[in-house]
């Protein structure tokens, strides 16, 4: 689009500055600044059907005998009663004295406003008096989110001016063939209808077109990444039919069918010439880590190095301990590389890795340092993959020569969203729980049951069990959330015969390490924590979790937290405490009491919060969906995926003229992935 904001008639330096407050710096950003709601100023609503706090258009005859004007604190208040065939309503205008002249001249009028309740009486407050000779045939009027000094009328004026003068510069992104095939709108019509829909059907057709476009750009990008990775020859590992059985003899438990299936998929990928690019997604406690260990077992058999990157030192130590416990006699040389180690220790470990004396290194972001180099890195594993940025993973992968990549996610993702979020990855799913793993009994409680709950927990601790108390915030007075400090102080008095400690993200790594170590040893009875315990903490003796202010968390996060108990064979419990009495909130939290299936919970969470907020994905820059609805657009998501794969098969570099426009958008999508379309 070869036009500047200042080229739009009516936009001068002052207006441009105001638009900049809304992060609108270009005409492209202007037209993509969509309304967050619409006002219906065409359909007349009878007085007896008006809804409180909802703006509506009414047509009334004025009762001039009720016209009143009074002054309070130098401000004018005008009132008049109007009526239609269904009833009467009083209208009120605050500090708009000029309105009285319009009211005296009119016998009837159409008014647009919101009905409010004052002192038990209904009023139409500050309604607009609609001009009868309007030529505007739009049903819905856009309402935009604004900032201080920027009003809706300004945005409407600028938007209208752009469309009147430059709408022909809006390029079509979806190729003509696909637009015709799926009966989609031209881009300029779709954008215009998003701002000025004549009917709801206009709006939905525009939304479908823009959702299709959004998905096509993303799926073409993913298809390009996948094609690129498949075209690269990685290390071809020698894999045999008996590998799973030989690996299993080191384990102290039986593998589930889901684990075995995932291992077969991993072995098939690693045996191929193309570099593996696979994700294992599974519920809390489903055995993803052991499945990933199978991949490194194959790498070790082939005399290749493996690096596993995890987000926290606590999780790194835990994986390191678990692996060595299982495979101490296998002869696999392991190392732990984390930031808190002394420089002398780190230097020695780095030397061993570089010289090939380490087969498997587990570490945190410390693995990304320039001083870390490998002898023959051909397998990279990342745990809790959504906590790492794309560039961080790329740095670790870059330390090898096109190594196989395996990522793990303990957050179950519904299938439809997986096609968007993990479009460039092959997916292995583990739903089954290991034998002997018991479901966690979850109860929803109000705070008036708190004292009873404390007494019950004391009984559990007396039996040798431990408990977590999780809170949404660290310090008091933080957005009125329940705080670790407050709960710790309260519980110290209530559990006066037991050891109560607290842990949170503001503490140093060494402080957190010490507290977790003491809790793991059983020296702490009650641990008060923030969501710092969400990732990977494994204390089988902890059988009770209390989550305070549970309504402050998303369902998937609550499920992740709940997964910190039930790690052993003992019966475990989770209590969700809330002060809320809102039916919608209670219904949402009840989901946790009805199922332990993380996939069902993730689906429900996604329905409630939408894909943008789900798992905090926006924060990690992995996904931004403005128009796609993962429920209403399920069929479209699959359709676009197939179309994108077909396009990339036929024209992998998008050289056809019909792809000229969309190619630039796909390239922008790929920039962070370090893939270039030639």
Image (cartoon, grey):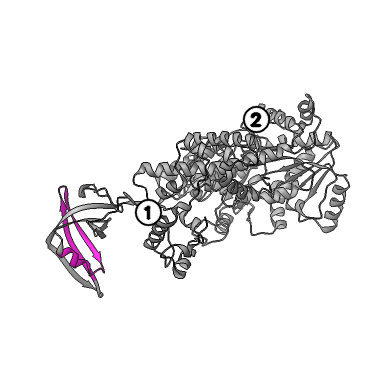
Q: Is residue 596 visible?
A: no
Residue 464 quadrant: top right
Observer-side mark, 2 or 1, equals: 1
Question: Looking at the rendered structure, which numbered label has been put on residue 264?
Answer: none
Residue 341 among those drawn in magenta = no
Q: Position of residue 634 (x, y in %)?
A: 50, 35
Q: Looking at the rendering, which quadrant does residue 655 occupy?
A: top right
- The count of marks equals 2
Q: Nearer the viewer, residue 197 or 98?
A: 197
Q: Quadrant of the C terminus?
A: top right
* Left or right for 127, reference 337: left
Residue 468 vs residue 9, the one in the foreground: 9
User: Farthest residue toward the left?
Assistant: 65
- Residue, disc 2: 436
* Label 2–label 1 contact, CB within 8 A: no
How far across and how far down the image is residue 239, in percent?
A: 79, 29
Q: Work out whether 233 lies above or below 446.
A: above
Judge left or right: residue 222 versus residue 290. Answer: left
Residue 208 at x, y percent in the picture: 45, 41
Disc marking residue 142: 1
Q: CA distance from mark 2 to mark 1?
A: 57 Å
* Quadrant hosting residue 8: bottom left
Per the rendered image, the range of residues in magenta is 76-104
Q: Nearer the viewer, residue 161 or 621?
A: 161
Q: As drawn, is 41 to the left or to the right of 241? A: left
Of labels 2 and 1, earlier in sequence is 1
Is 86 covered by the magenta stretch? yes
């Amino acid at each position: 689009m070869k036009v500047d904001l200042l080229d739009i008639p009516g936009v001068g330096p002052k207006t441009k500055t105001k638009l900049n407050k809304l992060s609108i710096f270009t005409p492209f950003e202007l037209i993509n600044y969509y309304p967050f709601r619409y006002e219906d100023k065409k359909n007349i609503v009878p007085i007896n059907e008006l809804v409180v706090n909802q703006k509506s258009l009414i047509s009334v005859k004025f009762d001039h005998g009720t016209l009143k004007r009074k002054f309070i604190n130098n401000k004018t208040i005008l009132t008049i009663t109007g009526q239609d065939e269904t009833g009467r309503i009083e209208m009120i205008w605050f500090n708009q004295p000029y309105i009285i002249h319009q009211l005296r001249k009119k016998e009837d009028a159409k008014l647009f406003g919101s009905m409010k309740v004052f002192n038990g009486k209904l009023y139409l407050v500050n309604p607009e008096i609609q001009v009868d000779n309007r030529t505007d045939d739009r049903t819905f009027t856009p309402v935009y989110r604004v900032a201080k000094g920027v009003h809706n009328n300004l945005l409407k004026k600028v938007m209208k001016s752009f469309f009147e003068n430059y709408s022909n510069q809006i390029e079509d992104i979806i190729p003509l063939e696909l637009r015709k095939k799926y009966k989609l709108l031209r881009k300029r019509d779709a954008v215009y209808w998003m701002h000025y829909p004549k009917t709801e059907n206009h709006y939905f057709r525009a939304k479908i077109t823009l959702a299709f476009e959004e998905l096509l750009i993303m799926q073409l990008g993913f298809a390009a990444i996948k094609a690129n990775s498949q075209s690269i020859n990685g290390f071809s590992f020698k894999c045999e039919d008996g590998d799973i059985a030989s690996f299993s003899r080191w384990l102290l438990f039986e593998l589930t069918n889901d684990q075995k299936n995932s291992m077969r998929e991993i072995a098939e990928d690693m045996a191929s010439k193309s570099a593996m690019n696979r994700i294992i997604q599974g519920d809390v406690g489903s055995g993803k880590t052991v499945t990933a260990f199978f991949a490194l077992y194959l790498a070790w058999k082939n005399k290749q190095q493996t690096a596993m990157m995890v987000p926290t030192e606590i999780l790194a130590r835990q994986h390191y301990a678990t692996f060595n416990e299982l495979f101490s006699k296998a002869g696999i040389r392991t190392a732990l590389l984390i930031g808190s180690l002394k420089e002398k220790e780190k230097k020695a470990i780095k030397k061993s890795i570089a010289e090939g004396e380490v087969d498997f290194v587990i570490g945190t972001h410390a693995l990304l340092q320039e001083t870390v180099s490998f002898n023959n890195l051909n397998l990279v594993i990342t745990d809790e993959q959504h906590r790492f940025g794309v560039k961080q993973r790329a740095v670790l992968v870059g330390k090898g020569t096109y190594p196989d990549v395996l990522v793990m996610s303990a957050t179950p993702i519904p299938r439809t969203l997986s096609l968007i979020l993990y479009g460039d990855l092959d997916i292995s799913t583990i739903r089954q729980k290991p034998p002997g793993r018991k479901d966690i009994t979850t109860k929803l409680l109000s705070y008036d049951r708190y004292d009873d709950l404390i007494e019950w927990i004391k009984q559990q601790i007396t039996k040798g069990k431990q408990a977590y108390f999780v809170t949404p915030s660290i310090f008091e007075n933080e957005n009125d959330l329940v705080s670790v400090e407050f709960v710790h102080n309260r519980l110290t008095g209530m559990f006066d015969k037991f050891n109560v400690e607290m842990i949170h993200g503001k503490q140093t790594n060494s402080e957190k390490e010490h507290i977790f170590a003491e809790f793991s040893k059983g020296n702490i009875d009650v641990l008060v924590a923030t969501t710092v315990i969400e990732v990977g903490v494994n204390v089988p003796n902890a059988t009770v979790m209390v989550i305070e202010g549970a309504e402050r968390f998303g369902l998937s996060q609550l499920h992740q937290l709940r997964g910190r108990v039930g790690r052993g064979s003992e019966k475990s419990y989770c209590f969700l405490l809330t002060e809320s009495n809102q039916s919608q909130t209670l219904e949402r939290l009840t989901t946790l009491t009805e199922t332990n299936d993380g996939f069902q919970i993730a689906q429900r969470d996604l329905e409630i919060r939408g894909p943008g907020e789900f798992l905090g994905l926006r924060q990690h820059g992995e996904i931004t969906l403005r128009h796609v609805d993962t429920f209403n657009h399920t069929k479209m998501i699959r359709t676009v995926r197939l179309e994108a794969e077909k396009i990339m098969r036929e024209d992998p570099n998008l050289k056809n003229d019909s792809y000229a426009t969309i190619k630039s958008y796909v390239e922008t999508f790929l920039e962070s992935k370090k893939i270039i379309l030639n």
